[in-house]
Image (cartoon, helix red, strand yellow):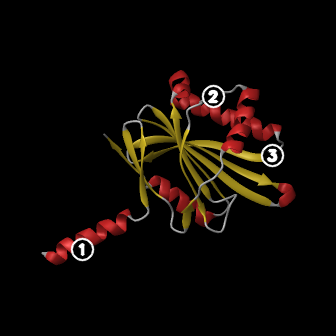
């Protein structure tokens, strides 16, 4: 009996190692970062200001002032690629346009910005089911001809606990794509 209990406790500790929980409205999100990735503490204020100015210029969607950044993780040997950022904010755009309508507007906005920057990018959308929660995914494949460099971005967006949950990732190779995607797809959501 002692062996069974010890084995059970050991398996629980192995499973939960590296897993963190985040409160999003009345829902608890359980997320485990990919192996060999580290939690980062970043200064997001300059990035947020840049994004805010682009949104104001283009007036594509309502700008949220209540965004909460939950985490940023990155591969230990990388700073600008192979990163994941989790955040949530109010759902005013979802309420105004519906989630599919908001995704369409956001994807059009992203396409328009790549065109204005004369950046070669392919933007697509799809759906993903994560622990019975429907997410919409906006993916971009971005190619910089002058540097012969390609990277991808993916934004996973869902309405969770009357909030807009957004998990954004940037990766530059298939191995990191698989690790990042698996970490997101294996998330769990528990209503309180």
Along the polypeptide, which appears first: circle 1 or circle 2?
Answer: 1
Could you tell me residue 125's position as x and y percent?
Answer: 59, 41
Most extreme residue toward the left, as rendered? 1
Out of 186 and 145, give the one closest to the viewer: 186
Q: Nearer the viewer, mark 1 or mark 3?
A: 1
Q: Secondary structure at mark 1?
A: helix
Mark 1: give few (<14), some (14-19) or many (20+) Cα within 10 Å.
Answer: few
> Mark number for residue 30?
none
- Mark-to-mark CA distance, 1 and 3: 54 Å
**Cβ atoms at labels 1 and 3 below 8 Å apart:** no
**Cβ atoms at labels 1 and 2 below 8 Å apart:** no
Residue at point 62%, 64% (across, down)? 174
Note whether 33 is above or below 70 in the view shown: below
Residue pointed to by mark 2: 63
Residue pointed to by mark 1: 7
Along the polypeptide, which appears first: circle 1 or circle 3?
Answer: 1
Residue pointed to by mark 3: 119
- Mark-to-mark CA distance, 1 and 2: 50 Å
In what quadrant of the picture does the C terminus appear? top left
Mark 3: give few (<14), some (14-19) or many (20+) Cα within 10 Å.
Answer: some
In what quadrant of the picture does the N terminus appear? bottom left
Q: Secondary structure at mark 3?
A: loop
Q: Looking at the image, can residue 98 be seen? A: no
Could you tell me residue 43's position as x and y percent?
Answer: 66, 49
Along the polypeptide, which appears first: circle 2 or circle 3?
Answer: 2
Q: Looking at the image, can residue 107 be seen? A: yes
Could you tell me residue 28's position as x and y percent?
Answer: 38, 45
């Amino acid at each position: 009996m002692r062996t069974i209990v010890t084995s059970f406790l050991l398996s629980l500790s192995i499973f939960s190692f590296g897993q963190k929980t985040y409160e999003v409205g009345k829902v608890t999100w359980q997320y485990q970062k990919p192996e060999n990735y580290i939690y980062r503490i970043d200064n997001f204020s300059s990035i947020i200001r840049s994004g805010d100015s682009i949104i104001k210029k283009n007036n594509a969607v309502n700008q949220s002032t209540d965004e909460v950044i939950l985490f940023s993780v990155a591969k230990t040997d990388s700073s600008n690629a192979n990163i994941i950022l989790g955040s949530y904010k109010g759902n005013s755009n979802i309420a105004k346009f519906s989630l599919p309508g908001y995704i369409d507007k956001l994807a059009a906005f992203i396409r328009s910005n790549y065109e204005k920057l004369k950046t070669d990018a392919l933007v697509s959308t799809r759906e993903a089911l994560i622990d019975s929660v429907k997410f919409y995914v906006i993916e971009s494949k971005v190619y910089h001809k002058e540097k012969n460099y390609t990277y991808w971005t993916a934004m996973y967006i869902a309405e969770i606990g009357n909030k807009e949950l957004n998990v954004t990732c940037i990766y530059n190779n298939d191995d990191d794509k698989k690790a990042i995607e698996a970490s997101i797809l294996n998330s769990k959501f528990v209503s309180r």
